[in-house]
Image (cartoon, rainbow, N blue to C red):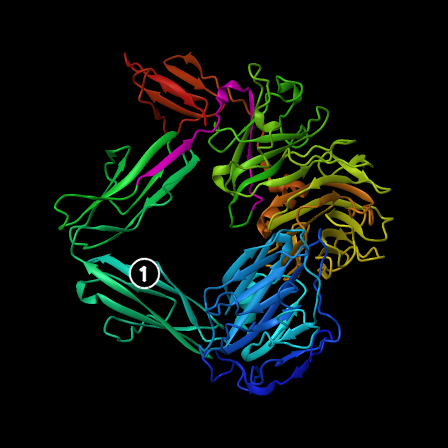
Amino acid sequence: YDYASGNNATYTNVTLGIPGYNSQATIKSDPTETAAEFGDFPPNDYAGNVPSYFNFGTPSGGNAEFTVEAWFNEYLYNATSGNAIVAVGYGNGGEQFVLDTGATTAGDLRFFVRNAAGAVSPASSTYAPANDGLWHHVVGVCDEANGTISLYMDGTLVGSGTITPGSGVWGATAPLSIGSRQSGNNGGTNYDGQFYGGIDDVAIYNYALTPSQVANDFCASGIAPIVTQISPTNQISANQGANVSVSVTASGTAPFTYQWRDNNNNVISYATGATLNLTNVQPTQAGTYTVTVGNTYGSGSANFSLSVGSGPPTISVDLSPTNLTAYAGTIATYSITVGGSGQGLAYQWYKDGTLIPGATSHSYTFAVLGGTNTYFCAVTNDFSGGVPTDSSTGTVIGIIPPSLNPLSYSSKTKITFSGYNRAETLQDFPVLVELGPTNVTGFSYSQFASPTGGDLRFTDGSGSNEIPYEIDEWNPSGTSTIWVQVPDLSSNSVIWAYWGNASDTTPPASTTNGAVWVPPAFQSLPSYDVVYHMEQSGFPYLDSTLQYPGNGTSAPGSAAGIVGQAGAFSGGSYLDAGAVNLGNTFTVSAWVNVAPTASNIQGVWVNGPGGYTSAEMALFINDYNTADGALLFGTGDGTSGQQPETATGLVTAGQWHLVSAAVNRPAGTVQLYVDGTLQASGNTVTDFPTNTDMNLGRFNAGSFAFDGSIDEARIHAGVDDANWTWASYETVAQNSSFENYSAVGSSTVTLSIQRSGNNIILSWASGTLQSASSVSGPYSNVNGATSPYTNAISGATTQFYRVRVQ
């Protein structure tokens, strides 16, 4: 009986009602579970004669996506038989797919698929399950779109292969069969590819299961714990007196219990978690330690060996990474873990081969210097005879960011972010900076040396290290909008804006090279793939990442946007970004203002033709034939699809809203945000193509065109979390409260001096007054000095004064 779609099979010569994978077996589950036994009356001992072919046949040029799953217990392997667990098609060239134990003459488990041209793509294990007495969960996955064939046993990948995307899949030459298959084209009269053993819970999916879905299916069946890893290793050497930490990882059905035993097999009363911590270990503690992991269905165990040495030190955990690139001034830490005896243990760190005074711990924290420098640690103990054991050498490359002299600029404003109240610090976050006389006290465009803002510069909190920026729109008669990449956004972050330098009116490279949106490669941070500011009024629309300019046949018009100008979409106007490769994780977003007349689906970001099961991803507003104001994210693989959505009424017409979808394809999850707030989430993503034409403002077959305005449309690699999404909304919609702009000040400070009787009076506009007895210093702050500052002339004493700015 087929519980899903009516493709019932007929048993022939099959023994029914045998015990399945249950609480009496090594792998444990429901004791009432029963299975079918095949091979008692070979050949022609099978379940088959399915009324309609179960057929994943796909012509060349298309992709097949499917999964075959079963539980089995193989009693006997027959090298002359096919040993088929599940198959479609006859053997020797007519198979569409086969899940069996015929990979080798030893009976190794395998799964293979034949493409439309007849080529076989196998995934084979090196395990022969016959006569091991165990029930096993086996899964074969065909993911042709991504070019992979995968074979899993008991929740773990045991074999993989490749299949050419677009090569299709062979049509069905014989119906689906379980427990046996035709070894050749014999007209369906002889199912002689016999399997010998029990088979239970066969399931077939018309999509490719992800690794996590396979593992979840396995564990959902009631699985006793299986210890999969001891970390850092199961052979540990430690110093006498050192601390040792060992962790265990297990698979199976949660929740788990843990109990560790010592080298004498005694229970360690405090050790009831996944990690065992031993402090101040001594030679008497050397030996074998055991952990038992349990759950409702049974238990599993593992052990590790501990040796406590009294010889020279050994490096058990080396410094990492051995090659590090970072901005100069960044704080970095190297650390090592040592094995051997801890008696007389001593550490000494070296920079470029020279001893670093005071660096005598197992770790060393330092500020990255400009240029290339090397670091290593030498370790000795009472048994090393003065000969150190050296760690690996770490090579650290310090990138010196471009810098400026604040005194070269006549005007400045300090920008802080007290409105950012989240605990997470966001790295390389693009904020919107608004400069104009209405929001920055003392601001005037006449202060600029360049009429187009070419002398504008931004720095981090140091006031001298330049950071990337891009002018969105320069508006000398109002407020100009600029996107600035803040290195570390928190409530304590500070950046500076400088202008008024007639000697440097050439804009920096970051204003045109996309640096605001693409962090340096050495930081390993996700970059933006597409950023449309929508200030153009015709093709091509510029992509600030310089990758995917927007083209098409019907360009949007121009309208007032949420940031400067926006695109006015109507009558089927759209932007075609081309084949944007979305990758496994990405976030699509846009500011939208839906026209009040819109009464149907409003396509925002879409890479498919439209339709609930079309092969596509689609971010859109409104359910079909409504103006309900819901935000939806539809995905489909060409056969099935899903479209999670928010509550209705969130995206109201005639108002600006930020809509976004953060997608994790391998996990099958999506989070939908409206105006920076999470409104819907779940495991509701069907696999979909990631490198087809991406359209903004419609489905790419022309349907469900957007009616209204779109601004700041983006695609960001990686899954934007709640804090990133909220800050993206706040920096635009609540700029005046999210950011604080100080009154415009002068970067040039003059220290004025005048005499009044027997006193001198010093005056300055800003900064800290310092004094010294020599013009070359050293200078120290004059305690409590504020401008104007009065000081009595005293005999022949000479005193020098200066003002320190920043």
Residue 232 at what x, y percent from top left? 34, 58
Q: In the rendered view, would you say 501 is above or below 780? A: above
Q: Indicate whether residue 174 is drawn in magenta.
A: no
Query: On the picture, is 579 further left or further right than 282?
Result: right
Residue 349 at what x, y percent from top left? 26, 40
Q: In the rendered view, would you say 408 is above or below 685? A: above
| Residue lying at 51% horizontally and 68% vertically, measured from the top left | 109
What is the secondary structure assignment of the residue under circle 1? strand
Residue span colored magenta: 393-420
> Which quadrant would residue 139 be assigned to in this image?
bottom right
Query: On the picture, is 341 further left or further right than 457?
Result: left
Amino acid type of disc 1?
A: Ser
Foreground residue among 196 and 491: 196
> Which quadrant would residue 777 be assigned to in this image?
top left
Q: Which residue is mark 1?
A: 245
Q: In the rendered view, would you say 615 is above or below 799? A: below
Quick check: can you spot residue 362?
A: yes
Residue 742 at what x, y percent from top left? 57, 32
Quadrant in which the C terminus appears = top left
